[in-house]
Image (tube, rainbow, N blue to C red):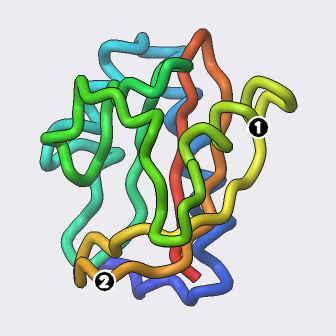
């Protein structure tokens, strides 16, 4: 039985929970095991059919280590990436993680199901030279 879709107001809490789960997974199974779980289409942290939450991992230089959506981005330096309003959201995520250890960043990004650009808020957490994050669409 599949769970009912999350209401919009529940998405940020679920995103934060997924990041905490991914960090715990990396600490218990290793960072490489986490990357496999994110990048594998059926992995625990990869976007599921009909859903929009997935985990992403970047190093502090902006190189994508894993992404549960758009796996072709793995290995790409995306530090200069901007949203449609010109916001350098990945730089902001790295800055928040470095300054506070974790936090939230607002920006705009294509929705994995529709491809339409929507407002998104992502929670990121610093772990051993990586930022691990998950975003929720508003």
Q: Residue at x 34, y 25 (%)?
A: 65
Tell me: 45 left or right of 21: left
Determine which quarter of the picture holds residue 75: top left
Q: Residue at x 58, y 74 (%)?
A: 11
Image quadrant for the N terminus?
bottom left
**Relative to 31, is 111 above or below?**
below
- Total count of labels: 2
Q: Residue at x 42, y 63 (%)?
A: 53
Residue ID for mark 1: 96
Asked if marks 1 and 2 touch (Cβ < 8 Å), the reply is no
Horizontal and vertical percent position of residue 111: 34, 75
Horizontal and vertical percent position of residue 49: 19, 72
Query: Callout 1: helix, strand or loop?
Result: helix
Tell me: 105 left or right of 23: right
Determine which quarter of the picture holds residue 48: bottom left
Q: Is residue 1 visible?
A: no
Horizontal and vertical percent position of residue 120: 55, 71
* Sequence-first tag of 1 and 2: 1
Q: Nearer the viewer, residue 68 or 28?
A: 68
Task: Give the spatial CA distance, label 1 vs label 2.
Answer: 26 Å
Residue ID for mark 2: 116
């Amino acid at each position: 039985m599949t769970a009912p879709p999350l209401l919009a107001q529940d998405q940020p809490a679920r995103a934060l929970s997924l990041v905490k789960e991914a960090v715990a997974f990396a600490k218990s199974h290793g960072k490489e095991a986490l990357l496999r779980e994110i990048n594998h289409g059926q992995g625990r942290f990869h976007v599921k059919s009909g859903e929009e939450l997935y985990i992403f991992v970047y190093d502090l230089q902006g190189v994508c280590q894993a992404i549960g959506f758009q796996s072709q981005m793995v290995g790409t330096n995306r530090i200069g990436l901007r949203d449609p309003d010109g916001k350098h959201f990945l730089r902001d995520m790295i800055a928040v993680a470095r300054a506070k250890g974790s936090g939230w960043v607002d920006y705009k990004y294509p929705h994995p199901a529709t491809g339409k650009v929507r407002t998104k808020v992502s929670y990121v957490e610093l772990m051993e030279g990586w930022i691990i994050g998950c975003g929720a669409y508003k």
